[in-house]
Amino acid sequence: MRGNAPTRGFTFVGLVIMMVIGCTVYLKLWSVSSYISLRDAEIMRSQFERAQNEALDESAEWRMKYDEEVQRSGKYLLELVQVREELEKKIEEAEKSKSDLAVLQKEKQSLHKRTESLLHELQSVKMKCHI
């Protein structure tokens, strides 16, 4: 059995060397993988930041469009209120003019009747004077 001892020692040393080489290769692959994963993480982070910035820009653009529409609709609403108030004033003026016209027509009729009565009275006085 002693003759097998050097072979066993070589086998053991070979096994230890193979384990060291295996661990070295594993560590090398792990470091490359972690470098790649770090690089991938940076790429994904930059892509995410770019997408987030684009989304913020688009959101800001839509918000600006919304604000413009709100401002425009407020302006139109103000104009509509002003036109409505002017129309109501004109309607009130027209109604007042109609009532004034009716009063003036009644006054005209009464003055016309009064004028006719005065003319008749004048003719009757003239007739009395000629007699």
Image (cartoon, grey):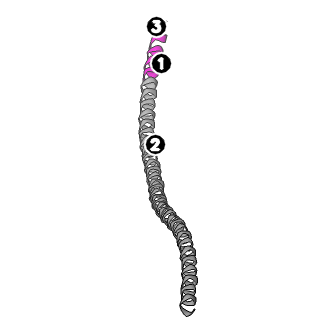
Q: Amino acid at mark 2?
A: Asp
Residue that badge 2 annotates: 40
Residue at 46% from the left image edge and 7% from the top image edge: 2
Question: Does the magenta portion include 5?
Answer: yes
Query: Which residue is under mark 3?
Result: 2
- Image coordinates of residue 26 in percent, x first then y, are 45, 30
- Residue 69, position in %: x, y? 48, 58
* Image position of 108 with respect to 79: above or below: below
Q: Which residues are magenta?
A: 1-16
Residue 23, located in which quarter of the rendered image? top left
Helix, strand or loop status at disc 3: helix
**Local crowd size for mark 1, using a 10 Å CA cut-off: few (<14), some (14–19), many (≥20):** few
Residue 55: where, in percent of width, then height? 47, 50
Check residue 11 in the rendering and tell me which mark sits there, or answer none: 1
Q: Is residue 88 magenta?
A: no
Q: Closer to us: mark 1 or mark 2?
A: 2
Q: 131 and 74: which one is in front?
A: 131
Nearest to the observer: residue 123 or residue 45: 123
